[in-house]
Image (tube, grey):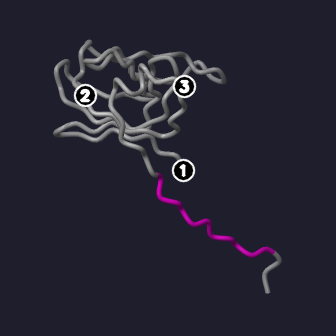
């Protein structure tokens, strides 16, 4: 008989509330996890930052703006051309930013792995 028993954790399905960019930008309420559809207005910038613990480890972030003025921050590399229609899933950060955990385009899906 083993001393320790493995406990399996069940994954809960994450639910996102579908909202418009205007609702996020002009509303004063909290939304939690949301999904937004829009067109990439600005050319995405991919930033490479030196890691805190090692000079050889790098962290990446992609930043772009959608057509209604909502800024999207994605903690990874997402190669999306300007003018591409995207669906972004993430957490709203007032006044007009979205911290993305998943980005879907016509041809690709970019997602942050949590486990």
- Please state the horizontal and vertical placement of residue 11, each as a whole percent of the image: 53, 61
- Marks 2/3: CA–CA distance: 33 Å
SS at mark 2 in the image: strand
The residue under label 2 is: 38
Which mark lies nearer to you, 2 or 3? 2
SS at mark 3 in the image: loop
- Please state the horizontal and vertical placement of residue 60, each as a whole percent of the image: 45, 23
Magenta span: 4-14
Q: Is residue 98 above or below residue 68?
A: below
Dot 2, how many residues are within 10 Å of its Cα: few (below 14), some (14-19), or many (20+)?
some
Name which residue lies at 57% across and 66% down: 10
Please say whether residue 26 is one of the residues in the magenta stretch.
Answer: no
Please say whether residue 10 is one of the residues in the magenta stretch.
Answer: yes
Left or right: 73 as drawn, with respect to 93? left
- Marks 1/3: CA–CA distance: 19 Å
Q: Is residue 31 above or below residue 21?
A: below
The answer to whether marks 2 and 3 mark residues whose Cβ atoms lie closer than 8 Å is no
The residue under label 1 is: 115
Left or right: 24 as drawn, with respect to 58? left
Which mark lies nearer to you, 1 or 2? 2
Name which residue lies at 28% across and 41% down: 109
Of all residues, the one furthest to the bottom in this rendering is: 1
The residue under label 3 is: 57
SS assignment for the magenta stretch, majority: loop
The N terminus: image quadrant: bottom right
Dot 3, how many residues are within 10 Å of its Cα: few (below 14), some (14-19), or many (20+)?
few
Name which residue lies at 25% across and 28% down: 38
| Residue nearest the observer in this picture, 95 or 43 | 95
| Residue nearest the observer in this picture, 56 or 40 | 40
- Please state the horizontal and vertical placement of residue 32, each as a whole percent of the image: 52, 38
């Amino acid at each position: 008989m083993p001393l320790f028993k493995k406990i399996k954790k069940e994954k809960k399905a994450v639910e996102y509330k579908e909202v418009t960019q205007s609702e996020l930008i002009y509303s004063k309420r909290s939304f939690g996890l949301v999904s937004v559809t829009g067109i990439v207005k600005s050319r995405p910038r991919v930033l490479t930052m030196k890691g805190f613990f090692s000079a050889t480890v790098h962290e990446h972030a992609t930043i772009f703006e959608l057509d209604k003025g909502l800024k999207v921050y994605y903690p990874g590399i997402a190669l999306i051309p300007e003018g591409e229609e995207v669906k972004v899933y993430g957490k709203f950060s007032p006044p007009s930013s979205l911290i993305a955990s998943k980005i879907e385009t016509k041809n690709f899906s970019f997602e942050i792995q949590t486990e």
